[in-house]
Image (cartoon, coloured by chain):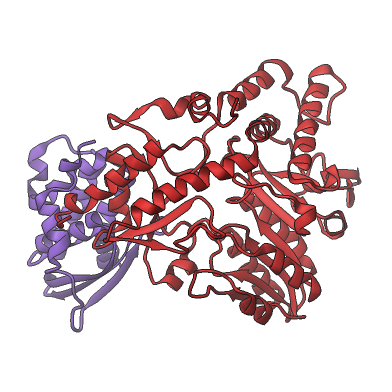
Chain colours: A red, B purple
Amino acid sequence: MDKFDIKKIKEDFPILSQKVNGKRLAYLDSGATTHRPNQVLDAMVEYNKVSNGNPHRGAHQLSIRATQEYDAAKVKVKEFINAKEIEEIIFTRNTTESLNLIARSYGELINKGDEILIAITEHHSNILPWQRVAREKDAVLKYMYLDDNGRINKKEIEEKISSKTKIVSIAHMSNVLGTIHPLEEIIEYSHKMGAIVVVDGAQSIPHMKVDVQKLDADFYVFSAHKMLGPMGIGVLYGKRELLEEMPPYLLGGDMIEYVTEQDATYAPIPFKFEAGTQNVEAAVGLRAAIEYLENLGMDKIKAHEMHLMEYALDKILSIPYVNIQGPKDLESKGGIISFTIDDVHPHDTATILDSYGVAIRSGHHCAQPLMKYLGLPATSRASFYLYNTEEDVDQFIDGIKNVREWLGYGP
Amino acid sequence: MDLNSIYTQLIMEHSKSGHNKRPLENPDISERGHNPSCGDDITLEIKIQDNIIEEAAYTGVGCAISQASASIMIDLIKGKSVDEALDIVDTFLSMIKKEISDEEELEILEDSIVFQNISNMPARVKCAVLAWHTLKEAVKSS
């Protein structure tokens, strides 16, 4: 039997079968957050009913079970991204917290005049923490820009990364344009020049197989809620030697070795970076989400999304008043279509599509420097995931064809 | 949600006409207002003489709701005293927050009553109130 049975998959997501505004729901906002299948919801309920306790703290059965559940989630994440060691996996709240942790902590190792390099396509969470490091350390924050095809090319990489560059921080896939950046090239060249590379994998890891060792990424971070898991848990993968060198981020319980009145020594990684009671329930959900993805197969998920993208792009490119932002072909592009409609502000587009049951995102997508670079105040974004269907795309296209008329423009 | 109650004829006309969308020469007050979460960004310019709003106009970018709201507000406040204008702004904001049950109280809002239904669309409330908050700030800071 073909494992990618879209009808059966949709049955796993109860939220998708509801009507909104009296219409069938076409959820095309998985770039913002994804939904959780029954398998994930059930795993979290089961944990709460049977195993809840504070991990790493008690000698009693429930604490032990909670510890086992938490550790099992770590093992699952390690295997999913093929990290070398389990200690290299740190749980945070989300991608934003992971990036802040790295910037705050690894940023301590930055000196005056050092360069930090990011891409113009970055999300604010991969800009602001570096702006602060640059300000506080008197370092220089630089940007890589896009070529005419909306991509970062080799020339730009080799021009911007120099021996002064200490950190390159870049999204694997742009949350606005869907562009998949040439990570292999960037990482290889960065290492050659002596820089480490931080990868924001929030948009990529839900949709493709990622092997952090093969990529040779120094840090790779992502959020559970964009990959069928719950909100409130994120992952920070870092190479052991880097994590060991870094000072802790939050201080408190569960991250110490010895504490005296005036001093403390810290626990080894990963505990050094996991102060306070962790979100075990969410870790259980993340593990179930990864199992769900693995069961379907990342390659099959990608193929399904690419089929939907092809189907959608073909239709949307034939509408004369719709403008696609970013790459218009599928080469190194994920399941995101960012677009504008002539004469219509993206917010109005989103409101009108919502009335047709189509959920998309409109705005600056937490990427104001990119919007400025593109010369746009905002865009609308449709993002696809494994539970979307051709029917969703048809509903989306039908909705788009009605937008201009609502605002009093001809078709 | 009924789109007809949001994208009304009046709102469409104001968002497209642009008759209040231009820079003023030598304004007495120029106030920028924006919604950081969505990027709507307008600059409201006002000329005041003897405490009367003689002229007002706006520039900037935003959705149909925010543009129409700015335009309708400007039509409404022109020729009014600053205090009258502030009273209208407060009444408008109270209407959006559904704090006014007496329909007669809303009469001073004239055309801008058209935004009453926006309160049923939480995602768009901030678009409708942008110009009004900006006017309040403008007068306060002057």
Q: Residue at x 30, y 63 (%)?
A: B137
Q: Is residue B95 left or right of residue A136?
A: left
Q: How many marks?
A: 0
Q: Residue A113: percent from the left, percent from the top?
A: 73, 81
Q: Residue A366: percent from the left, percent from the top?
A: 49, 58
Q: Quadrant of residue B21?
A: bottom left
Q: Residue at x 71, y 74 (%)?
A: A137
| Front residue of A51 and A163 | A163
* Quadrant, the C terminus of chain A: bottom left
Q: Quadrant of residue B40?
A: bottom left
* Quadrant, the N terminus of chain A: top right
Rendered view: B141 above or below A163? above
Q: Residue A266: percent from the left, percent from the top?
A: 88, 49
Q: Is residue B34 visible?
A: yes
Q: Residue at x 86, y 45 (%)?
A: A85
Q: Is residue A32 visible?
A: no
Q: Quadrant of residue A214?
A: bottom right
Q: Is residue B122 left or right of residue A147?
A: left
Q: Is residue A324 left or right of residue A172?
A: left
